[in-house]
Image (cartoon, rainbow, N blue to C red):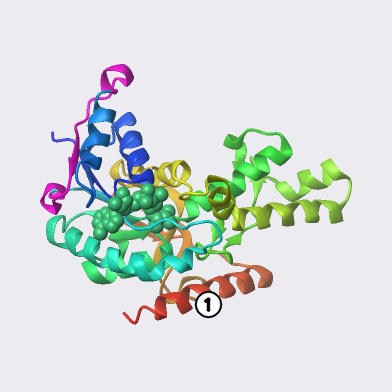
Amino acid sequence: MARPKIALIGGGQIGGVLAQLAALRELGDVVLFDIVEGMPQGKCLDIAEAAPVDGFDVSLKGANDYKDIAGANVVIVTAGLPRKPGMSRDDLIEVNSKIMRSVAEGIRDNAPDAFVIVISNPLDAMVTLCQKVTGFPAERVIGQAGVLDSARFQAFIAWELGVSVKDVNAMTLGGHGDDMVPLVRYASVNGIPVMELLEQKYGSAAKAKEVMEAMVKRTRGAGGEVVALLKTGSAFYSPASSAIAMAESILKDQKRVLPTCALLNGEFGVKGYYVGVPCVLGANGVEKILEFKLDAEEQAMMDKSVAAVKGLVDSLNL
Ligand code: APR
């Protein structure tokens, strides 16, 4: 049986790590596409030459022609500019929407059956544009943001409590912007509420609240924190890992529940917009959106985040 095929559009920082992770995990054969000639070919050759050391049996091909993505089962899009220090993700909309239009046409015309995972920013707007231009069913076009935002939140909690990241469960909802919604109420260490553990640690509910608020703030600004340190470019290891988890869940029909930027049809009070929510990802893409009750404070935060997404998406006049 043929191996699955994974096409990566954009061979920059994230694209390169995606190619390496897909190979290391033997998710399938990899095509790395970029408009820059030679660069994706060079990266693929470099990764392929590590195969005897790492022991993976997949093929890797660099490409500058969309024909090479034909037959892809999953396409992950990172084409577009990353932000510079001081920029918000939204500042990228003009330049990246032009790029996204051409990328989506390339996918539509060459890999019409693919599942598409968008990483390019501003994420919620770019995934909306990608779905509109490809015309693919919404369950096949999704965005990666929530897995990473949640991972950042989980990492901060684990570091604060001195426990393994493996035992922390926490999730963010909403758009991939400064108004994202880290869900404090459901954050737990193997089911034990994080707020309870913070209260034990600090001996006061007020201090626990203060510490959690700081973690929520850091989560919202975590992408910017990396940008400020890197000075050129934005985070690339963690976005790649996050998108690979989504691709793997689809390719292996794992049905993992992953926060995903998905098109909503009334869930959480949102209709017709892409927003981050927990989804079951399996062989059919978004197989289910898991809706649950938000309390008044959470719903208000969600509404604010969705309003920001709407403002940006509406500016595209799709
Ligand atoms: N088609 C294909 N690739 C393109 C196009 C295009 N029209 N235009 C630009 N690219 C490529 C660039 O040549 C570059 O190699 O996209 C790649 C982007 O790589 P980086 O600049 O290294 O950016 P990266 O860090 O990978 O981030 C990509 O993901 O998280 C978001 O905000 C981030 O929008 C950015 C995207």
**Residue 261 position within the rendered picture, expressed as x and y whole percent measured from the top left:** 42, 61
Image vertical order of residue 127 relative to residue 313, above or below: above
Image vertical order of residue 101 relative to residue 143, above or below: below
Tally the marks. 1
Q: Mark 1 sits on what residue?
A: 307
Q: Is residue 47 left or right of residue 125?
A: left
Quarter of the rendering containing residue 237: top left
Q: Residue furthest right?
A: 203
Quarter of the rendering containing residue 59: top left
**Which secondary structure lies at badge 1?**
helix
**Residue 23 position within the rendered picture, expressed as x and y whole percent measured from the top left:** 29, 32
Q: Which residues are magenta?
A: 50-70
Q: Amino acid at mark 1?
A: Ala
Is residue 51 in the magenta section?
A: yes
Q: Is residue 89 visible?
A: yes
Which one is in front, 173 or 62?
Answer: 62
Image vertical order of residue 5 relative to residue 277, above or below: above
